[in-house]
């Protein structure tokens, strides 16, 4: 039985769950950062990277202590910060002496769900957040009063963390991959995107997100967001069949690029790139090559249109075939990507047991 089954959830005001709720006192904008050795996370209103825009040196003020949940007021982004950090303007911190890395993850998910009601036109101001209820596990103290069930949330967080680590081990590259191997010495040359991939076309499985059929989310919905591999939620099967997996997607308006391993639906203006030799290992290399080149495009008159993509070259690994022709080195990129992926995974999870 899951720890979740033992919990009772009730709505409580955010200010009743946390003992501290305020603007992060040690804050500064990017243009105010002093140079130096990057040590501390700089937490902003970004939805990417746990809201960490980068790392900065020790500033004039001491950093905010770790073990806090941060809320970006302008963008409604919520993240748990385990270590000392600096904030940006309009980044609030939530604290409790009972907060830890396990129940913090549970509360982060709860808070994200609760503030979905806010938007750019109806922002999550400090006053509105203070009046917002969130669903939290509760119990009764010795006086019979309803209080937050911190111990129960910690058990749930511990269980979910163990499951996530176990799934990550299942999905990682086999231990047979030698992470100590030298990376193959590849030769990179500029190649047209259309010469690297066999097909590049607009997604045929696109929908306006507001018109998606509701139900249990099974298929990723790929939009033009930069976060979460371009995935903006999950959706049930729609009237159109989904795009098959094993493809690279490009969001034209935002120049966002990601590899999609499983079948998926998309929003508008998503290009889908495919090749018979594409696999998850070489796809990670090609995604990096594409992202590097997409930096020249931007919003406005210099956006990544289909015509401009067709005229764009990327640095791809090449080799010579039996006829002496230059071709894409798919095998070389596959080995390169497999070793890099294995190295990254071993650093995150050095053992195979939970």
Image (spheres, rainbow, N blue to C red):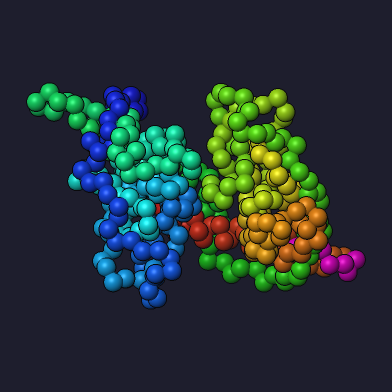
Left/right of residue 277 with respect to residue 255 in the rendered view: right
Residue 177 at what x, y percent from top left? 56, 57
Left/right of residue 234 with respect to residue 311 in the rendered view: left
Q: Quadrant of residue 27?
A: bottom left
Tell me, yes or no, if residue 75 can be seen here.
Answer: yes
Residue sitting at x 60%, y 27%: 236
Residue 314 at what x, y percent from top left? 73, 64
Residue 13 at what x, y percent from top left? 27, 33
Q: In this view, does 61 lie above or below 97?
A: below
Q: In which quarter of the image is residue 231?
A: top right
Residue sitting at x 78%, y 49%: 200
Residue at the front extreme?
A: 121
Left/right of residue 237 with respect to residue 23 in the rendered view: right
Residue sitting at x 45%, y 39%: 122
Q: In this view, does 330 lie above or below 120?
A: below
Residue at the bottom extreme?
A: 36
Residue 139 at what x, y percent from top left? 21, 27
Tell me, yes or no, if residue 279 can be seen here.
Answer: no
Image quadrant containing the C terminus: top left
Residues 66 and 166: in front is 66
Q: Does the magenta stretch include residue 315?
A: no
Image quadrant containing the N terminus: top left
Q: Is residue 237 above or below residue 39?
A: above
Residues drawn in magenta? 323-329
Residues 124 and 33: in front is 124
């Amino acid at each position: 039985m899951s720890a979740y089954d033992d919990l009772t959830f009730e709505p409580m005001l955010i200010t009743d769950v946390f003992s501290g709720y305020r603007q992060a006192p040690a804050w500064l904008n990017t243009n105010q950062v002093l140079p130096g050795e990057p040590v501390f996370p700089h937490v902003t209103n970004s939805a990417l990277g746990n809201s960490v825009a980068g790392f900065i040196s020790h500033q004039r003020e001491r950093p905010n202590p770790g073990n806090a949940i941060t809320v970006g007021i302008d963008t409604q982004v919520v993240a748990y910060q385990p270590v000392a950090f600096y904030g940006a303007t309009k980044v609030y911190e939530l604290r409790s002496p009972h907060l830890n890395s396990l129940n913090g993850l549970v509360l982060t998910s709860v808070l994200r769900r609760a503030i979905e009601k806010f938007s750019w036109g109806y922002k999550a101001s400090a006053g509105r957040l203070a009046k917002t209820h969130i669903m939290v596990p509760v119990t009764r103290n010795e006086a019979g009063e309803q209080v937050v069930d911190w111990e129960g949330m910690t058990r749930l967080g511990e269980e979910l963390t163990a499951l996530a680590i176990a799934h990550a081990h299942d999905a990682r590259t086999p231990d047979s991959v030698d992470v100590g191997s030298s990376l193959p010495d590849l030769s990179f040359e500029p190649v047209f995107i259309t010469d690297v991939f066999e097909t590049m076309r607009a997604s045929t499985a696109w929908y306006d997100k507001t018109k998606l059929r509701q139900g249990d989310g099974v298929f990723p919905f790929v939009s033009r967001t930069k976060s979460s591999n371009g995935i903006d939620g999950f959706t049930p099967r729609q009237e159109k069949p989904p795009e098959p997996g094993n493809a690279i997607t490009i969001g034209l308006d935002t120049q966002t690029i990601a590899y999609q391993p499983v079948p998926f639906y998309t929003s508008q203006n998503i290009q889908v790139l495919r090749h018979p030799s594409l696999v998850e290992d070489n796809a990670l290399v090609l995604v990096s090559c594409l992202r590097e080149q997409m930096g020249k495009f931007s919003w406005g008159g210099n956006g990544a249109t289909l015509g401009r993509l067709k005229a764009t070259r990327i640095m791809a690994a090449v080799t010579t075939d039996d006829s002496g022709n230059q071709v894409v080195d798919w095998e070389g990129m596959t080995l390169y990507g497999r070793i890099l992926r294995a190295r990254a995974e071993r650093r995150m999870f050095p053992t195979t047991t939970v």
